[in-house]
Each structure stands twice: as structure tokens, then as C-alpha cells.
Amino acid sequence: MALLEVEDLRVSFPTDDGVVQAVRGVSFQVDRGETLGLVGESGSGKSVATQTITGLTRGADVHGRAVFDGRDLLQATASELREVRGPGIGMIFQDPLTSLHPAYRVGWQIEEMIRAHQAVSRAQSRRRAVEMLGLVGIPHAAERVDDYPHQFSGGMRQRVMIAMAMALDPSLLIADEPTTALDVTVQAQVLQVMQRLQSDFGTAIIMITHDLGVVAEMADRVAVMYAGRLMERAPRRDAFYRPHHPYTEGLFDSLPTRGGQRLTPIVGTPPSLIHPPSGCPFHPRCRYAFDACATDVPALEPVDGNPAHVSACWLSHDSSLRERLRRAMKAASSS
Amino acid sequence: MLRFLVVRTLTGLFVLWVISVAVFVLFFVAPSNVAHTLAGRQATPETIALINHRLGLDRPLWRQYLDFLTNALHGDLGYDYYHQQPVTTIIGQAFPITFSLAIGAAIIWLVLGVYNGVVSATHPRSLRDRSLTVTSLVFYSMPSFVLGLGALYFLYYKLTLSGHTWFPAGGYAPLSEGIGPWTRHLILPWLTIALVSAATYTRLSRASMLDVLGEDYIRTAEAKGLGQRRVTYRHALRSALTPVVTQFGIDLGQLVGGVVITEQIFSLPGLGKTAVNAITQQDLPVIIGIVLVASTAVVLANILVDLCYAFLDPRVRLT
């Protein structure tokens, strides 16, 4: 059985301007020890989806199921959710500069989490905090445990966040754009720390990112979200070499390559989530779009009959036909 | 830290010196007739000159100020013009009353205001939030003489008429007579001051809490699986207190300088009441003494506020 199984998750927020449909029927699963890359641009609903699972979205209408370790978290009470947050699911966030409490020492912040869930002595929790800080590669952990967050650099603070999230050995780590706010050189180090802890602890990771480089580095499987919907779900190799959905294709085309070709951006802007487009939400920006795309919502169908690789698109799910279409489109646009 | 304290004490002393000069000058710029008042209606110019001479008012201004300053530095603030009582004794009698009044009221309004603010902020737009807001505004817009007289009318007059003598009509019982009488004499004045001020603190801490509750580190605290109470008080309130502490320092400093109206209503012979009497009688030594005590309180409160900042936020360095 999968560690986390999310089925038809729908999240909407009532606002003064109308109902924001942030997540509109998303399903995915995460197995023990694997890494799922959750990809999409800002506002696609990646963060809302994962924060809803852990009960961190306030004032939202939530429907669907999110079964973690045999328990539906969307039906869980506040105190049941508190028991899951920490020992079951650890979380790290985008901005390490603002995610730690500025007024408390980093060691205290880690110890606080340990003592909230385990009946251990101060000395024990402190030893664990020092150990974790050492594991994430903070030099002189035994001394720095008593420093305040502002005495650490951004990369070091993200390591502290990782140490905190992993301190109770959770079976799932949700990393919400953990490297976005960091320098490129520091990004690689932080990812390495996560990978090392993952192999040591056997943790599953949901890696939320819009950085396909991070996905290539970390993910076993990739799920692509757009406008609150899942567009494509595939093993990493398929996603990179045989992307089916035009949106996934567009994401890869907007990456720089060695050849020095011009980047091809996805034209237009993400749609409003208060009045999402009819049919496929991507059709106003899609270069392949035809009549059906504007009226009917495509379901996730297997590509080449492979149930591990599914795509929600009206184009042919035969990958050789799809590839021919892609080449024709490229030739037409370059001529 | 030590450097900070030394620098702040020196600037504080400088401020006090400027204030003493200002009061002195103001007093002599205004038309003075202390001698006339003391001598009575039918006084001869000779009597008035004699009184002026005895009080030292016939000497040049700079001489009078210099004498005052030298004595003040030796802890002697002079004698009042009318009963020849040492000013330090007068202040010594009035200060504990005002101080008791200020501290008690401050604790009540701080606890009440901050707690209500936190409740409002954690349940925004709820019935509790709205009713606390309305209650706050009602007390906020109520002048303290209305609230004070209302309290006296209902809680002293009406209650006593119906046979329940819970509260005295006014006056003060020192702490040496026991904590019971002390509290009984002060509870109505405390509430009069506190309910008006608590409103400010409710609004202030509500706004500040709402800001902090949107911070990333609050989400982190929730992601750690901490209890709601711990997230609210240990994590959010800790950061939300900074603006509250600023306001509290200012208010408390002013309060220790005397609460004129409330002291008047409840016949508490504190600094405020003494100051008003001294001003109507142009009793310069008493006025200067009280002004200096009040200014010292404000200066001290400000130093304490800065020390609190450093305690609340480790990023603050005291220099």
C-alpha cells in the first residue's frame, strides 16, 4: 500500500472577489522511500495541495481523500493532525530566512518539536538536536546549537529547517521549494543533504518545485500541475524524454540547453482561478489546441498503455504519433 | 550593555536638567504673586518685600537657580512656600499613592488588553472579536471622569445605600495597613484608568498579532505539530509584544507622573492632586519637585523599554 494516497483533492477559498478554486481534483500517491517531484508554475496549487493534506490551510473548503499510513487526514481531528505533523510528516518551506522564529535559539526550536511529541528529558532532546545539526552538515554543531537564526546564513538556516523536519524521523518529508530562495551553489549542497538523509532514514519526499533541474536531481516520479489540476504524471525518464502534455513540453522547452538555442517561453499568463477556462485549463496558451480542448475536460489517460505515465490531453496517447506532431509543430514555427 | 546604560543615564540626566531650567524660567516669566497671597489682602509693600526676601525671591534669577541646583544635587529640593515642609517629604507622601495606582492599573489593563487582543486576533471577524471591539471602543471613548463618577455612583453610593459597603468613597490606605484595605481603596480608581487604556492595548495587540500570525515561522510552528495555545502564546505573542511594550513604557511613565482626574475623583492625595494644588498656589519648589519626579519616571520607563526590546528580540543590540 502506498504511504500517501491523495484522491480527487479539491480545495477552494471563498474570497470577496469570488471563490478561488486553488486545487480542482488532484490525485497522486507517494510510496515509502521514493521522491515525487511536484512541478508547476506559481499559483498552480502545488503548495495549497500539500499544505491542505497536513491541515495547514485555514478557511478553505476541502473535499476528497488523503490517506496517510491508513488514516484519512482530511477527516482527522485537529489533535490527530498535530500527532501526524512532525513524527509522521515533516515539512520544510521556501524561505529559510523567515521560517525560523527569530527570537529563539535554533537548538531550542528543534528540541521544542521533539518534546512536543516524545516524553524525553531536556538533555536527551538537546543531544538529538545537536546530532541532527551535525547530520545536516552544520560545523561545530555542539556550539552553534545555542545560536539564533540571524547568526546563520540562508543555506545554513535551510539545513536547520531540514534538521528540525527530520528530527523525529518522519516517513514523509514535504519540501516546499526548499532551494528557491538559495544561491545556486548552496542549492546543490542542500539537495545533497536531503538525499543523504533520505537514504539514511528511508524517508519519502514530496519535492515541490518549479525548478526542473531539482526534479532531474531528486525525483523518481514527476507530477505536473497547472491551474489546480494534474496535467501529467510520469516516471522521471519519461517526463524528461517523452513528455506528452503540451504544458510539460513547454516547461522543458523553456529550459536553457547546451546548443545555445533561443529559449521558447510558454506564451500568455496562468489563468484566473476564480474563473478558470472551460475544457482543458491550458488550452488558451496551448499551441496544439483544437475545438474539443475548449469545451471538454480531458481525463488522465495512459500514454502508450503505460499506467505509470498518464496525461490529461486530447492529443493522441500514442507516443510516436505525438512525437511526429511535435516535430511538425517545431518545423512550422522555425520556418 | 554597560555602555548603553551609562550613555542612557547621562542623556537622561541631561533631559532632567533641561526640564528643570524650563520650569524655572516659565515660573518667573509668568506674573508671580506668591508674596501677595501669603501676606493677605491688606499687606503693606514692606511685608511683601519681607516675604519675598525670606523666600529668596528677591535675589537674581540665576542665583536662585544655582542655589536650587546645588541643593537638588545634595538631595534637597527645598521647602514649600506655605507650610515650610520639605518638598522631598511631600513627594515622599504622595509618590507611593500614585505609584500604587499606576502599577495596579497598568497590570490590569495590560493583561486585559493583551488577552482580549489575542482572542480577537485568533478568531478574526467572529462574534467574540466584534463584541470585544465594540466594548473596547465604548470604554475608549469614555472620559475617565465619566467612568470614575459612574463607578462611584453605582458601586459606592448605590451599593452602600442598599446595605453593601464594598467600596469606600475614596481616600487611600497604605499597604502597611494590609493588602485588603489597600486593594479596596484602589480597585475603583484602578478600573477607571485601566478600562480606558485597555482599549488601546486590545486594538494594538490585535493588529500586531494578526501581522505575526501571517509570518512563515508561525506556519513552521504549526508544521511542528505544536498545540494551538503554544503557537499562539509562545510563538506569536512573543513577537507581537514589541509595539505593545513601546506603548506600555510611554503610558506607564506618564502615569507615574500623576493621574490628575482620577486622583481628584477618588480623593487620592497622590502626585497629580498635589501638583494641581501646587500650581494653583504657585508653589514653585513643589512644582519643580513633582515635574522632576515625573520626568525621571518617563526617562526610566524609556530605558526599560529598550532593555525589553533586547530581551524580546535577540537581533537588537544595545549600544
Image (cartoon, coloured by chain):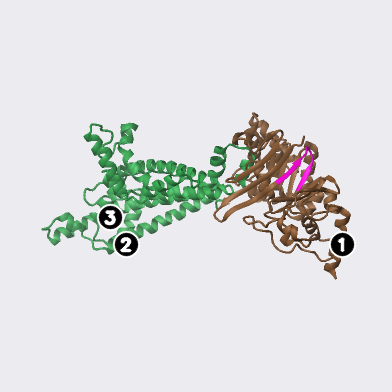
The image position of residue B230, as x and y in percent, is 56, 38
Give the CA distance from mark 1 to mark 2: 93 Å
Q: Which residues are magenta?
A: A26-37
Depth order, front residue of A22/B201? A22
The image position of residue A168, as x and y in percent, is 70, 35
Residue A266 appears left or right of A85: right
Answer whether residue B248 is visible to the viewer in this image.
no
The part of the image, by quadrant, that contains residue B281 is: bottom left
Q: Number of marks in the image?
A: 3
Q: Chain of mark 2?
A: B
Q: Are marks 3 and 2 in contact (CB under 8 Å)?
A: no
Q: Chain of mark 1?
A: A
Depth order, front residue of A259/B113? A259
Residue A199 appears left or right of B254: right
Callout 1: SS: helix
Callout 3: SS: helix
B5 is higher (above) or lower (below) than A166: below
Q: Are marks 1 and 3 in contact (CB under 8 Å)?
A: no
Mark 2 belongs to which amino acid? Val
**Label drawn at residue B25:** 2
- Please give the letter of the chain rendered in green: B
**Where does label 3 land, which residue?**
B284
Residue B189 appears left or right of B232: left
Give the CA distance from mark 3 to mark 2: 11 Å
**Where does label 1 land, which residue?**
A327
Residue A234 appears left or right of B135: right
Counting other residues with Cα less than 10 Å from the Cα at mark 2, is it few (<14), some (14-19), or many (20 or more)? some
Counting other residues with Cα less than 10 Å from the Cα at mark 1, is it few (<14), some (14-19), or many (20 or more)? few
Mark 3 belongs to which amino acid? Leu
**Label drawn at residue A205:** none
- What colour is chain A? brown
